[in-house]
Image (spheres, rainbow, N blue to C red):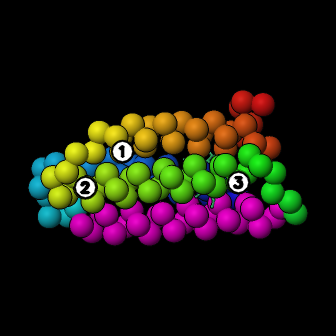
Amino acid sequence: MTHAHITTWVVALILFVVAIVLQSKGHEKTKTLHMLLRLFYVFIIATGAWILHSMSSFPFLYIIKVIVGIWVIGTMEMILVRTAKGKNTNILWLQFFVAFVVALYLGFKLPFGFSFFS
Ligand code: HEM
């Protein structure tokens, strides 16, 4: 099930990058892609919740992992919305990279699935 979780956020990341590129070109398909990306936000949360569902207790790092995961999703959404409105997104990009690295680190450190950092 961690593989399903990884698949959903990798697909979301690809959709996000493609949406950013299309948006910068003013492409009409950006809206459709953004909607699809939103569907993948749901899949990321659902697969994360699915992993949590199999657990009997929630150690502190898991709570941080969930918050950081939702933070990554929040920054992706806000970057796309604010870019569409022509607003500055520098701080959001910084948050996105920090949150993404922390989510990867925590995910791969925690015991389910791959544990590269423990
Ligand atoms: C885009 C955002 C996210 C990224 C990049 C991300 C990344 C990861 C990674 C790399 C893993 C490790 C998988 C493995 O070891 O096989 C993982 C595991 C996990 N993620 Fe996420 N995640 C995100 C969002 C979320 C959300 C929103 C939730 C909660 C609803 C969540 C809950 C979990 C849980 C519970 C695990 C298992 C931790 C463990 O290995 O013990 N994640 N995630």
Residue 54 sits inside the magenta stretch: yes
Is residue 61 found left or right of 98 in the rendered image? right
* Residue ID at (65%, 60%): 48
Q: Decide: marks 1, 2 in contact (CB < 8 A)? A: yes
Work out whether 46 lies above or below 18.
below
Please indicate, yes or no, whether residue 5 appears anywhere in the rendered image. yes
Q: Label 3 belongs to which residue?
A: 63
Q: Decide: marks 3, 2 in contact (CB < 8 A)? A: no
* Labelled disc at residue 82: 2
Residue 21 appears at what percent x and percent y?
A: 23, 47
* Helix, strand or loop status at disc 2: helix
Instruction: Determine the image quadrant of residue 51.
Output: bottom right
* Residue ID at (88%, 63%): 56
The local crowd at label 3, few if under 14, some if 14 to 19, many if 20 or more residues have their Cα within 10 Å, is: few
The magenta-colored residue range is: 31-55
Q: Decide: marks 3, 1 in contact (CB < 8 A)? A: no
Query: From the image, which quarter does the N terminus lie in?
Result: bottom right
Among all residues in the image, which is located at the extreme top? 117
Work out whether 109 lies above or below 30.
above
Q: Separation of disc 1 and disc 2 at Cα? A: 9 Å
Pick the front one: 37 or 67: 67
* Helix, strand or loop status at disc 1: helix
Q: Label 1 belongs to which residue?
A: 92
Is residue 92 found left or right of 99 in the rendered image? left
